[in-house]
Structure formats: structure tokens, C-alpha cells
Amino acid sequence: MTTDLLAWDENDQTLDPDAEYRMLLNGLRRTEGFGLFFVECSPFQGEKLIKRTRKDLRGKRVDVLKLEAPISDGNLFKRIKTFLDEREETLFTRFQRFVGVSQQTDVLFIQGLELSLLDYEESKKRLGWSSEKIFSYSWHGVPPVLINLNQQRERFRDSFATRIVFLLPVFAVKYLVHRAPDFFDWRSGVAQIADDTATLSRESRRLWLEGGYSQYLSWTQEQRNRRILEIQSLLEAEKLDESERVNLHFEQGNLFDASMEWKAAIAAYNAALAAYDAASAIQPDDPEALYNKDLILKLKGLTEQTVLCEKEIALNELGHYEEAIAAYDAAITIKPDDHEVLYLKGVALGNLGRNEEAIAAYNAALAAYDAASAIQPDDPEALYNKDLILKLKGLTEQIVLCEKEIALNELGHYEEAIAAYDAAITIKPDDHEVLYLKGVALGNLGRYEEAIAAYDAAITIKPDLHKALYLKGIALWNLGRHEEAIAAYNAAIAIQPDNHEAWDNKGYALANAGQLNEAISSFDKAIEINPQHANAIYNKAYALSMQGDLESAFELLQQAFDIDPNYREMAKTDTDFDPIRADPRFQALLER
């Protein structure tokens, strides 16, 4: 059998693995200096391939660059160069030199490039699942790592006298073909090495046994992505047994679910059901298979309910609050004790300013949550169901309390809000957001010392909480502690330089401290950030009037009045303008 080193069919999985390996090996032997090879294989087959190549290329140095995480800057060239330049002198390399093995890397295998593709946001969206095809590809946009490969192919050739072999799953090779064609076209060869049936069975069982929804929840997204790819590399194999395909699709659905990729999870569960139907045609009366189907259907149903919830959230985020409330009411009709939907209804009502109704919804959510949490600790079925609902975007009593507190605050029920905040702090003393909101309520009641204490507690937990620093400055100002107020504003601005209100308040504090030039600079910064901020324009007019620049002051006052007529009414009684109140030009501005 003869194989064309450059020929490649992205849909052909029927090639002889041994013939493909021999083709690759011959290509590596014949190529002098730089060469670019791609091997379409699973991670498991890749490990075997590296061992086999090292054995068959005696006298040649074979190294492996294993990418354990996405390349954040997309610069694979730099990673390869650093790897080749900084190889450590190990006992193994000294032994290689002793027995006559080349000390320059002749062949470099690269594993894990696919992690950078999955990390790319658009790539994640395109890992969409359908009943027709495992992956649906849309080649719109290019991940940074592929942009880098396309742009630096000449540098690869000119810098590396090494045969570089990329070990990639099927989807990643297809990605390269369509998204990095300039780089892929420089290939010296492509090999397709499929797993044998025994390997597929062994690795499928390993991944299935190692899995578990609760475990996936504790993983990082990077760990889940890696496992999704491992499973996908097995699912792409034609020789995979249908019963194993059921388990792998099921685990993949759980992984997507734990990642809150709801639509992908549903499609994976659908794929598991389709594989189940194919498997059950072989063993129609298998009770374990029937149990598995029931479990898949249950999880799919829970995920579909989450997608409905996501739709409601989307309506909420788009500002379609009335539509969102109607959707929540429909969901509550189906499941009256759904604490999450009741909570989200409260959010939508609050966004419409219907705060009393929002509070009622939050109270209902709290009652439903308390009922749901009263699960018998020794009831295994109840505990199992509790584990399943962890897939939903969980709510805690703390979150619901916080939203209720905000509604009370907005209604002016500050004393009640403070009591609710104190109750929440008792449950979770390190909740900086609740401490901050308590400070807001205390400030609204004029209890500035207590407000500052609450802000300080929040800042201790989260030092970059700029909004707490800003409001602390206001509280300090109201206590007459002007220098401390300026320091608080400066701290807020250092964290959030585009906070025009902080610049404005800092300017006013400086003006009252007699630092008029610094105050005007601060007002100018606020106006630069937000040219329509009438308060900063009004305050700058005050500072200029204190300097005696009345023409400029009157011009700015007119600008402030044009933006917000309320400032004309304010100026009529504002003592800051008493020194110029008798000026006919000032009186004319007020009477227009």
C-alpha cells in the first residue's frame, strides 16, 4: 500500500493506522531541517505515538512540548522558541549525548494546541451540538493563536531546524484547515491514526468512571474543557461501541451543564438518547439501559427548564421586564415553589420600580427556598435530587435577602433595610456588598459615623470597592472632615479614574478648602469624562466666581441650566453664590 504524504481527506477515518504511522515516520526521516507535520489522533493515541517514534528514530532527539493551558497571548512561536532555548541539562539528556543521540531537537511533538481553540470565546460558541452533526463549524473570525500561526509561518521556517509535529483531535485539524490555511498549507505531511477498539473501550470506561456531576462542579472551566475534548476525541471514532457512546455523550452533557452551557448540554443529552436508541436495538430488554435512559431524560428535562429560565433572564437583561414577568408567571403556574423564578420575578418588578410587589416576590422566594432546603439528611433519593438541582443557577437565602434589602432601601424604608442587612451580615459577616449597602442606608438616615464604619468594613474585605470609598468621602464631607473626604475621593479615583462624580465631589471639597485652581482642574476632569454632567459645570461656575472670573462663571451657569433647569432653581437659594447674588447679570440668568 502506498500513501501520499500530502494527501488528506478530513472526513476519512478508514485509513490503516500502521500505514499512516509508517508514512509519518518516513516523512520525518526524509525531511532535513524544518518540517511541519499534523497527526489527527486522540490524546491517548498521541502518547503511544510519541513512545513509538522515539524507539524508531534512534539517534534522533525527540522532545515533547505539552501545552497544559490555553496560550493567553496566542504566541505559539514564542512558546516553542523558549522551550527549545531553555532545555535543561538533565540526567536523561546527558545519557543521550553519551550514547550518541543528537543534542539538537530533531523532532518536536506539540500536544494541547486545541485548548487554545476551545478557550477562544467564539470557538466555545461554535462547539454547538446538534442531532445531525457532532460539531457545527462556522469559520467566522480567527482565534489569536491561529492569527499568530498564519502571520509567523516564515519565522517558523527560518528559526527552527526542527520537524514540528502537531498532535490534534479531529475538530482541531479541521479548525486549522479553515482558520489557519496559510500555515496548514506548509505541511510536510498529515497522518490520521485512529484508536483501536480495545483502546477506545478502555479509555471510554476510564473517562466514564472518573466522571461525576458533583466532581465537575468543583473543577475549573479549564479542567472541564480538557475533559470535553478528551471525550470528543473518542466520540469522533467510528469504531466506538454504541453503549460506550451513550455514556460519553451523557458525561459530556454533564460537563456542559456544570459549565452552564445549557444548550450544548441539551444537545449532548439528545445525542446520548440517540445513541441509546441505537444500542437498545441490539439489547432491547436491558434493565440497566432503561434506567440510564430515564436518568438522561430527567437531566435533559432539568436543563430545558434552565434554558427557559435563561430566556426569562435574557428578557430581563434586555429591559423587557413586562415580558419577563409574564414568562415568570407562566413558569410559576407550572411550579409554584420555584424559588429561583420567584426571585427573578422580584428582580424584574424592582427594575420597573414596583418595589412593594418585588418585596412580596422575594418573600415568596425565601419561603420556597426554606421549604426546599428542609430535605431529610438521611434520604438518599432526596440527596440525589438535591445534587441534580445544583445544575440550576442556585440561589441562596443570602442573595434573596440582598435583593429584598435593596428594594426596601429604594422605598426609603431605611430602618427596615438596615435590620435586614444586619440579619444578612449575621449569616455572612464577610459580604462586602451587604456592608456597603448598609452604609448607604445609614448615610440616607444621616448616621454618617456609622455609615463610615460600614464602608470601612466593606473596604477591609474588598480594598478596591471604589463605590464605598466614594460614598465614604461624601459621609466624611457631611461631618466636616474635608481633608479626609478628599483623600477618600482620591482613593476612589485611583481605582476608577473615569468616575466623574468622584472628580466633581473632590473638586467641590477642594474649592471649599480654598484650593481653587486644583478644584477647577478636578471639575474639568469630570466634565471631560461626562460633558453633560450639569453638577460639575455648576460647581466649576462657583469656583470661577470665587476667583472673580464672573464672565466665565455666568457662561457655565447658563450651560448647567440648559442641561438641567433644576439648577436654575437651586441657584436662587444656593449660599455659594451669595457673594455675586446682587450682580445684575446673575439676576438676569435666574429670571430667564
Image (cartoon, grey):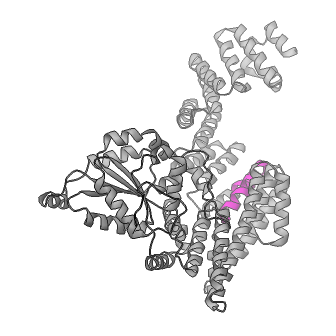
Q: Quadrant of the N terminus?
A: bottom left
Q: Quadrant of the C terminus?
A: top right
Identify which residue is drawn at 82% across, 7% down: 584
Task: State whether the magenta stretch is mostly helix, strand or loop.
Answer: helix
Residue 356: horizontal and vertical position, in percent?
A: 84, 56
Residue 336: horizontal and vertical position, in percent?
A: 81, 71
- Residue 378: within the magenta? no
Asked if residue 351 lies left or right of residue 128, the reply is right
- Residue 415: within the magenta? yes
Above or below for 29 versus 547: below
Residue 334 seen by the camera: yes
Identify which residue is drawn at 38% across, 70% down: 18
Asked if residue 480 lies left or right of residue 70, the reply is right
Identify which residue is drawn at 51% across, 61% down: 170
Above or below for 402 versus 532: below
Asked if residue 542 lies left or right of residue 355, the reply is left
Residue 564: horizontal and vertical position, in percent?
A: 80, 26
Q: Quadrant of residue 54?
A: bottom left
Residue 428: horizontal and vertical position, in percent?
A: 59, 62
Q: Quadrant of residue 91?
A: bottom left
Identify which residue is drawn at 55% across, 49% down: 178
| Along the line of sight, the residue nearer the viewer: 103 or 2 | 2
Bounds of the magenta segment: 393-418
Above or below for 538 versus 431: above
Residue 408 seen by the camera: no
